[in-house]
Image (spheres, grey):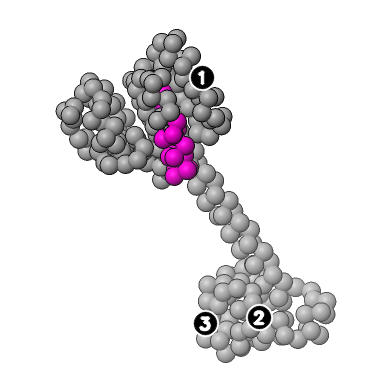
Amino acid sequence: IAPFVPLLVEGRGICMMSTAWRDKQDHHLINFIGAFLAANLYRLNFLSISPDFIFNNGGLSVAFIFETSWDCGNAAAVFSRVNALKRQFKNIYVVVAVPTVEQIESFNQSYFKYGMELGCPAFVPVNDPEMGFEMMLKIAHARGVCKQQDISSTMRNEREQAVQCMDAYVRVLTSIPGIDDHDANMLAQAIGSIEAIAKASESSILESTDLSRDKAETIIRFFRDPQFYLSPKIN
């Protein structure tokens, strides 16, 4: 078993490495990975997991199969594993080190021989294992950043929609004669939706707000007396 030192560095995210994968690797590669993660503020955990790596970054998990040196004699097992894991993980990549021309040709032939669908999952050929791990970290980080941007964009859109809804809410209530923005905001906080205000009794409006009795009566008439809300008004 290659020696390793667990790193407990709080930072950008978490990298989970398969213990089965680790135990097959040269200790120099494991040390490189540990140092590279520490330099990029990632915490490294060793776990019994199905993929070789899982990165959690920005609330998004990305799995990786990492073949550190392509073995043409092991192609069937590799692609069988890829097919199994791509059904389990939504975000999965396959990083393959192919340092020689012969390995590149063998990998390309095997890719089509075993009926891989382009981009499902994405394969990332690299020159060496160190480059492969660097690519993995960049992919995981980029996916995490995109996830955070999507969340931020969604929250921004929701805030804009909330402001627009509140503006429409205030416009409806201030169309009632004698009701101003302050009154509308008070009704929103004390009673709630337009529907709730339309159903509220005069006594509940008076108890919940500091509106005058005349304003409470006007609100009741506005929502319940057709002759009142259909007649022309001048504010």
Asked if residue 148 can be seen in this view, the reply is no
The correct choice, above or below, for 227 with respect to 41 in the image is: below
- Cα distance between the residues tagged 1 and 2: 71 Å
Q: Mark 1 — residue?
A: 109
Report the front residue among 16 and 73.
Answer: 73
Q: What residue is shown at x 53% (from left), y 72% (from top)?
A: 189
The correct choice, above or below, for 199 with respect to 116 in the image is: below
Q: What residue is shown at x 35% (from left), y 40% (from top)?
A: 50
Asked if residue 149 can be seen in this view, the reply is yes
Tell me where residue 9 sits by quadrant: top left
Percent x, y of residue 111: 51, 24
Q: Mark 2 — residue?
A: 198
Q: Amino acid at mark 2?
A: Ala
Report the front residue among 225 and 75.
Answer: 75
Q: What residue is shown at x 43% (from left), y 40% (from top)?
A: 85
Q: Earlier in the sequence, mark 2 or mark 3?
A: 2
The question of residue 181 being in magenta is answered with: no
The question of residue 95 being in magenta is answered with: yes
Numbered label attached to residue 208: 3
On the picture, is 216 further left or further right than 94?
A: right
| Element under disc 3 | helix
In this picture, which residue range is highlighted in magenta?
A: 79-96
Between circles 1 and 2, the one closer to the viewer is 1
Q: What residue is shown at x 26% (from left), y 22% (from top)?
A: 29
- Cα distance between the residues tagged 2 and 3: 14 Å
Tell me where residue 118 sits by quadrant: top right
Percent x, y of residue 109: 51, 19
| Element under disc 2 | helix
